[in-house]
Amino acid sequence: MLRSTETKATQRKAFPNHRNYRIDDLTACVPREAPLTELPASFKDWDSLAARLSCKNDEEVRAFRAAVDAMPPLDHTTLTEIREIQRGFMLIAHIAQTYVFGMPGSQPLQELPEQVAQPYVALAERLGCRPVMAVAPYAFYNWRVDETRPWWSESRNITFPALQICHTLTPTEQLFGSISVLSESIAGPLYPHITRALETVDKDGDDAQFIVRECLEGVLQSIRDIMEATQEIWKGCDPATFFRQVRTFLSGWSDPQLFPNGLLFRGVTTFTESPDPIDPYALSTATVTNQPNDPVVHKALAGDPGIRLKFAGASAAQNPSVAACDLFLGVHHRGQVGDSLSSNGKHHNLLAEVRNHMEGPHRRYLNDLARHGGLRPWLTRKLEESPDQPGVREMGVAYNACVEDLTAFRSKHLAIATQFVVLEAKKALREKAAMTGTPEGEGSEEAKGSGGSSVVPFLKQARSETSETKVVTSPR
Ligand code: HEM
């Protein structure tokens, strides 16, 4: 059935071609060429600090911070090639995490020194990212392969163990980081299928439904591949270690209890958001409104020697491929209805906002896909107007298979989030209650994701919004 927002008019909006947005046919939003493993010699300070990110005690944290404080400012403008810029940003993002957070459980610092803050903001601006830990610096710019064992091939014959994460803040992040790379890069073929389907719809020729059906079958395979890659998490990622250690270093600086005034970036006067930032309170992920109500720059305090930024940290929700499936199929996500309203009276829409944490071209691709409207309006019109035309019903069935598997992905992912976040949060509360002698329920909060969501209601809502998208295909 047509939704109220879907018009009967033939859709003629320009469709985005993924190749214009730094998205690769084989490795999606992960660069196909392996990231550099070192920068030019003049950046040896960054490279050597990144080799000692994982601190085991307070003394090591103090020594790390002292080394950062003593580091001279380095001229990031001499980094010109894209892989140099990506590596520079990745190194600085990791150095900033250890500098601010030290070790899991310790009180974070509230500021970054000039020699980290300035290149962090400048390199983020050059990539269209935000100066905070996100999936791109955490994983996409931070991997290497064992040269003798290729980790992808066109037949999806992936030899996963060959993929390794180079810099980690805790040694246990290897598997978690490489699954983030794998689950995005495995979806490479998704994008050519989306582009071909939208191009076909644009031409609307007599054989369109046959081509679109083929594309939907390709999309379905990618959804299954993402789902399979995500399941690797059960093979060696320990939930307690994830919850107590890894999450610390995925954090940003938006938690009002830990960072009441955001994080101070010393010596920085402005941060220019990449073009096309999306309103974090957008009513739907399918609506692109560019009036961010949440100031990216937190209010300055009197005498501040820099700007204060408040950003949430890394979450695999920042992997663009699942969002691309949603927008292509026409799955619309509303703001988190279960959550309390923000101070401006609106519901935060985390699934729209995660786009602001992606590399600039990837955010613009998703926004342009949202503006286009995806496949659904054309497909539902075909099903309504010419259900008996050869190939139309089969196309509807292929579409529903994609929606069903995307729903299944969300069920399996919910099981992961429950095990790794919700149950671990409960365990931590029980331990705290036993230590302090307080009743267990006291001070207990609903488990929050690293993106700041109330995990279970949020993920369940995303799942039902997916399953609701199925279309009616008339029986033969
Ligand atoms: C230990 C592994 C993982 C845990 C604990 C986990 C947990 C979470 C949590 C708590 C959220 C809610 C948003 C937030 O506040 O961050 C979320 C969202 C999300 N995660 Fe994961 N996640 C994991 C791995 C993955 C992987 C490998 C993928 C691969 C694509 C993925 C894809 C997503 C997506 C797309 C969302 C947005 C919600 C949706 O679209 O349904 N996650 N995750």
Image: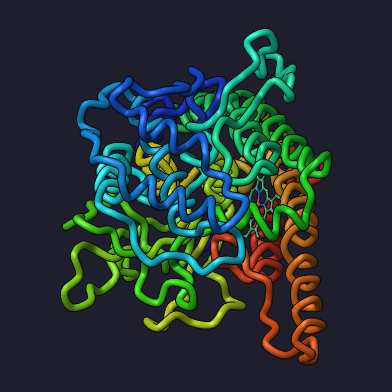
The residue drawn where x is 65% and y is 15% is 146
- Please tell me whether residue 121 is drawn above or below residue 439 in the rendered image: above
Q: Nearer the viewer, residue 329 or 21?
A: 21
Please state the horizontal and vertical placement of residue 122, each as a whole percent of the image.
25, 43
Residue 289 in the image: above or below residue 14: below
66 lies above or below 230: below
What's the image's color scheme? Answer: rainbow
Quadrant in the picture for residue 243 = bottom right
| Residue in view at x 33 percent, y 57 percent | 112
Q: Is residue 378 visible?
A: no
Q: How many marks?
A: 0
Seen as rendered, the residue at the extreme top is 148
Q: Position of residue 441 (x, y in %)?
A: 77, 88
Vertical relation: 374 (above or below) 271: above
Q: Is residue 106 visible?
A: yes
Q: Position of residue 191 (x, y in %)?
A: 53, 29
Question: The C terminus appears in which quarter of the rendering?
Answer: top right
**Residue 266 screen position, x and y as percent:** 24, 58
Q: Residue at x 70, y 12 (%)?
A: 149
Q: Position of 471 compared to 411: left or right?
A: left
Identity of the residue drawn at 75% across and 44% down: 405
Left or right of 179, for residue 437: right
Of 205 and 288, nearer the camera is 288
In front of the other: 224 or 51: 51
Quadrant in the picture for the N terminus: bottom right
**88 lies left or right of 60:** left
